[in-house]
Image (spheres, helix red, strand yellow):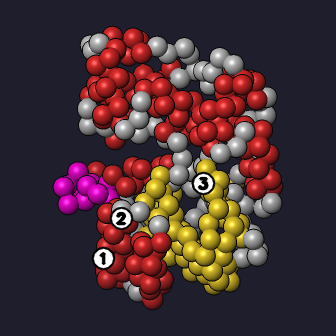
Amino acid sequence: MKNIIREITPLTNEEFFVVLYHPNAKFDFPTHYHPEFEINYVEGASGKRIVGESVNKYDGCDLVLTGPDIFHSWQSETGGAELVVTIQFHKDMLPNSYQNKKLLAPIRDMLQRSHRGIVYGKETIEKLAPRIKNLINENGFISFLDFLTILQEMALADDQKVLCSQSFSPEVDMFKSRRIRLACDYINKNFEKKIKIENISNLIGMTDSSFCHFFKKRTQKSFVDYLNEVRIGHAAVQLIETSKTISEVCYSCGFNNVSNFNRIFRTKKGSTPTEFRKFNQQQIMKY
């Protein structure tokens, strides 16, 4: 990760959050990460967005929430944006004793998902953009209340989408079922090995067929699809962060042949591993 830097943010311990207002932003800051949560609103630009292993195109406006230490950057096809508003806030802004309250459960769950990056759709952007931009004009207790309201609206948004794969930040704790947590934990810890259905069905005390049905019902994914998603997620990170060959990445992530790895990677990521690595290196080196 030599091309990815750690940012020292201006947020102090005395502040709940900080709002950074950048008219005519140039997008000249390198791909970076920091221990704070961040909401980034981009207006009047089109280009590519890097969030962890995810590289996607955005057009016009963009609204993204990133969790602590997930690297991210934006680039514009025209070299800049009309406006960028960045809101950064501490990991412990809402202590656990508050997050465990039912009223704040949606925000708590969203913050947990944000460790894989969350992007919001047009409807939420149109609804929240004026309020996000207005935060720069507010201060004191009112600004804090408005900020919490924005977080709540984002948490309840129907058009939010997680950007990175399961393995980038495993969401085992998102599942309420103890047996599903055990199964996903086993997969995340042993993805590089040969995993059979019976390995997990025996672990949680179910028959193979019962486990497959149970897993699909609770996760909305088949066992094989979930396993492949975890492996491809780890492969994507290695392609970005290491100089391993495609073959080395393939076998280190649990695939047994390169052609099968290439096929599944293209299905999940829309490009071959070679194309994915080349594109990510080009995006990072632009800064």
Decide: few, some or many residues near mark 3? Use Cα within 10 Å; few <14, some 14-19, many ≥20.
many
Rendered location of residue 185, percent (x, y): 41, 26
Q: Which amino acid lies under the numbered mark 2 shown in the image of this protein?
A: Ala
User: What kind of residue is marked 1?
Assistant: Leu
The percent position of residue 233, horizontal first and vertical second, equals 58, 37
Q: Do the residues under discs 3 and 1 have CB atoms within 8 angstroms? A: no
Label 2 sits on residue: 157
Q: Secondary structure at mark 3?
A: strand
Q: Work out whether residue 279 or residue 23 is closer to the camera in this orientation and state it.
A: 279
- Where is residue 181, by image quadrant? top left
Q: In the rendering, at what x and y percent does residue 102 appear? A: 18, 55
Residue 143 seen in the figure: yes
In the visual, does 50 lie left or right of 242?
A: left
- Quadrant including the C terminus: bottom right
Indicate the quadrant where residue 25 lies: bottom right
Q: Report the span colored magenta.
A: 98-108
Measuring 43% from the left and 26% from the top, which residue is drawn there? 223
Rendered residue at 53%/23% (across/down): 191
* Mark 3 or mark 1: whose residue is earlier in sequence: 3
Residue 48 among magenta residues: no
Q: Which residue is mark 3?
A: 51
Secondary structure category for the residue under label 1: helix
Q: Which residue is mark 1?
A: 145
Image quarter (top left, top right, bottom left or bottom right) of the N terminus = top right
Q: Is residue 74 left or right of residue 9?
A: right
The residue mark sitting in front, 3 or 1, is: 3
As drawn, the residue found furthest toward the left would be 102
> Is 104 one of the magenta-colored residues?
yes
Mark 2 Cα-neighbour bin, 10 Å: few <14, some 14–19, many ≥20: some
Question: Residue 34 at x, y = what percent?
Answer: 57, 55
Decide which of 28, 64 is in the foreground and name it. 64
